[in-house]
Amino acid sequence: MSILVLADLHDGRLAGVTAHVVAAARAIGGTIDVLVAGEGAQPAAEQAATLDGVSRVRMADNAAYAHRLAESMGQLLEALADDYTHVLASTSTTGKNVLPRLAALKGVGQISDIISVESADTFKRPIYAGNAVAKVHSADALKVITVRPSAFDAVASSVGTDVVIEAVDYVADNTQSRFVSEALAQSDRPELGGASVIVSGGRGMGNGENFKLLGGVADKLGAAVGASRAAVDAGYVPNDMQVGQTGKIVAPELYIAVGISGAIQHLAGMKDSRVIVAINKDADAPIFQVADYGLVGDLFEVLPELENKL
Amino acid sequence: MKVLVAVKRVIDYNVKIRVKPDGSDVDLTHVKMAMNPFCEIAVEEAVRLKEKGIASEIVAVTVGPKAAQEQLRAAMALGADRAIHVHTDARVDSLGAAQLLARIVDEEQPGIVLLGKQAIDSDNNQTGQMLAALSGFSQGTFASALEVDEQGATVTREIDGGLQTLRLSLPAVITTDLRLNEPRYAKLPDIMKAKKKPLDVRTPEELDVSIASNISLLGVEPPAERPGGVTVGSVDELIDKLKNEAKVIA
Ligand SMILES: Cc1cc2nc3c(=O)[nH]c(=O)nc-3n(C[C@H](O)[C@H](O)[C@H](O)COP(=O)(O)OP(=O)(O)OC[C@H]3O[C@@H](n4cnc5c(N)ncnc54)[C@H](O)[C@@H]3O)c2cc1C
Ligand SMILES: Nc1ncnc2c1ncn2[C@@H]1O[C@H](COP(=O)(O)O)[C@@H](O)[C@H]1O
C-alpha cells in the first residue's frame, strides 16, 4: 500500500487535522506521503515532516496553489495519484472541495468521512445524519477517501527526523477560477475542530449580543464557541461556528449545549463528544436524551452563575 | 442562459431512520420522502436567476426510481420549465449520478448547473465536484451568495474559517449551502400547472453510462448508544459533577 495524504493548511501552517488523517493512513498501513500544496509551503512542509509515520513530504510550493482552488488542486492530485493505492484528505471544506474531483477524473468512487478503518479496502462511515453507520468496501484500484478527524487520534510529532521534503514541479494551469477575497473569522479562542471544550449556543440565545454570556463561560474553560444552524441563520454568529450534519463535526471532551433543542442535524455534529451538558428551559427538549448532565433552567440565569462559580 | 438543476429524492429531513434488523441496510419502508433540502435551495436560486432575467430556461433533472418524478414536479411547481428523469431502480452512487448528469449537461449545454452541496441520505458531498471535473466546468461549492452575469459568476463560499469569494468562468457548477436563500413554497395553481409541463424520461443505458459501482455496502449498524444521563438540580451540582464525576474540568 502507498498512501498520499493531502495536508490542510491554516495561515500558512499545517492545520491540526492533518495529524488525524495521518493516523487514519497508519491504520490502513503502508508508506505514507504527505502532499503540502500552497504558496510559501515550506513551513507547513517542515511541520508535516515531523509527523510520526510519514515517509516523505511532497511539497508543491507555487502561486498556482495559493488558495488551493478546486481546479488547480484537482489537476495536481491527478498528476500525482498514479503512485498511490489510497489518497486521503480530511473532511474539511478543502478536502470536500477537491477530493471528489480526483475520484471523478480517475473514474473511481469516493468514500466520504470515514470514522474507522476495518482493513485496507473496508471502512465505516456515518450516513443519514449519523443515525446509521455503513460498512463499505471499495474494489477500486485507487481509493479516494475523506477522513473525519475527530474519529482518529492525532499521531505524535517528533523533531529531528530525516524525512525528506521533495519538491513537486507540476504546475496546474487554471484559468477557470480566480480568488477574489476572504473574510476569515478572527478569534482568540481555540478552533472548534481542535478544542477540548466547546460551549455552543442556539436560537434560545435570542441575539448575537447575548453570545457574550457564552463567551464568559468559554473563557473560564478555555473553550471554543459553537452554534446551532438556527443561531447562524438568524445572524447571531458567523457560519464557521455551525456545528452539525452540514456544519462542523466535533467530538470534544466536554460539549455544553445552551438553548439548543437537539434536532437530529445538530446531534449529528456533536453526539460523539465524551461528556455532554445541556442547558435548556424546556425539560422535554430532545437534547436531554443525549446529555450526560441536563440542567433545566433559563440560560439568562444559569450562564452568569456558571461563569461566576467556575 | 440555460440553468440546469439537479434534484434528489431523499427521506424527509425530519425522519429519524432505523437500521433493518438484519443489518443489511436502513429501513425506508413507509418513510416520508421529499426533495433533498439543499436541492430546494438550488431550485430556488435557479428561479431567482430567472426572475433577474439571467436564466432563460430552467431544466430540473433527477436520477432515480419512478417515484422521483414527484420531486421533478415539485421543482416545476416552483418554477422549473421542464424536467428530465433518468430512470433507474438501481442504487446510484455519486459518481454514477455525476456521470449521468455529465451526459445531460453535454446535451443541454447549460451556462450554470446548480446542485445541493450534500444529499442528506448518503451525506456524500461529492456529486457537484465530480460533475464539474467530468464536464470541465468551473466549480463553486458551498455557495452562500451567487451573482451571475454574461461573463462569469461571483460566488461566496462557506469555508471552515469563514467566507471565501471566487470569480468563476462560465459554464460553472455551483453547489448550494444553507444560507444561499430561503426557498419559497409552491402555490396551488403552480402545482396544477406543473403537471402539464414537459417531463422527459431517459435511461442510463440510452445515455451509455454504466452506473455499476465498485463501492459496495457490506452492512449497516445503528450508531453507538449513549448511556442515559442525569438531571442536575443546580449550577453547583453541575460543577461538582463535571469536576468530580466526569473529571472534565479542573
Ligand atoms: C438540510 C438541513 C441541514 C441542517 N444542518 C444543521 C446543522 O448542521 N446544525 C444544526 O444545528 N442544525 C442544522 N439544521 C437545522 C435543525 O433541523 C434545527 O432547525 C436547528 O438545529 C435548531 O436550532 P436550535 O436548537 O438552536 O433552535 P430551536 O430548535 O428553536 O431550539 C431553541 C431551544 O432553546 C430553548 N430556549 C429558548 N429560550 C431559552 C432560555 N431563555 N433558556 C434556556 N433555553 C431556552 C428552547 O427551549 C429550545 O429548545 C439543518 C436542517 C436542515 C433541513
Ligand atoms: N440521484 C441523483 N439525482 C439528481 N441529483 C443528484 C442525485 N444524487 C446527487 N445529486 C445532486 O448532488 C447533490 C449532492 O449529492 P451528494 O454528492 O450525493 O451528497 C444533491 O443535492 C443533488 O443536487
Image: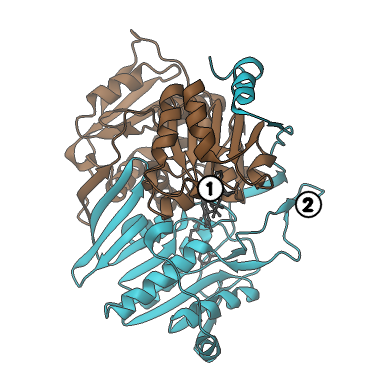
Q: Which quadrant holds the N terminus of chain B?
A: bottom left
- Mark closer to the observer (2, 1): 1
Q: Mark 2 points at which residue?
A: B20
Q: Which residue is drawn at 40% across and 55% down?
A: B129
Q: Say what amino acid the circle numbered 1 marks.
A: Gln
Mark 1 vs ligand 1: CB below 8 Å: yes
Residue B92, compared with residue B187, is above or below; it is: above
Nearer to the camera, B195 or A208: A208
The dot on residue A245 is 1
Residue B79: x and y in percent read: 43, 81
Does the image show residue A147? no
- A204 relative position to A136: left or right: left
Residue at coordinates 49% horizontally, 50% vertically from top-left?
A203
Tell me the shade of chain B: cyan
Q: In this view, does A205 lie above or below A164?
A: below
Chain painted brown: A
Q: Is residue B95 visible?
A: yes
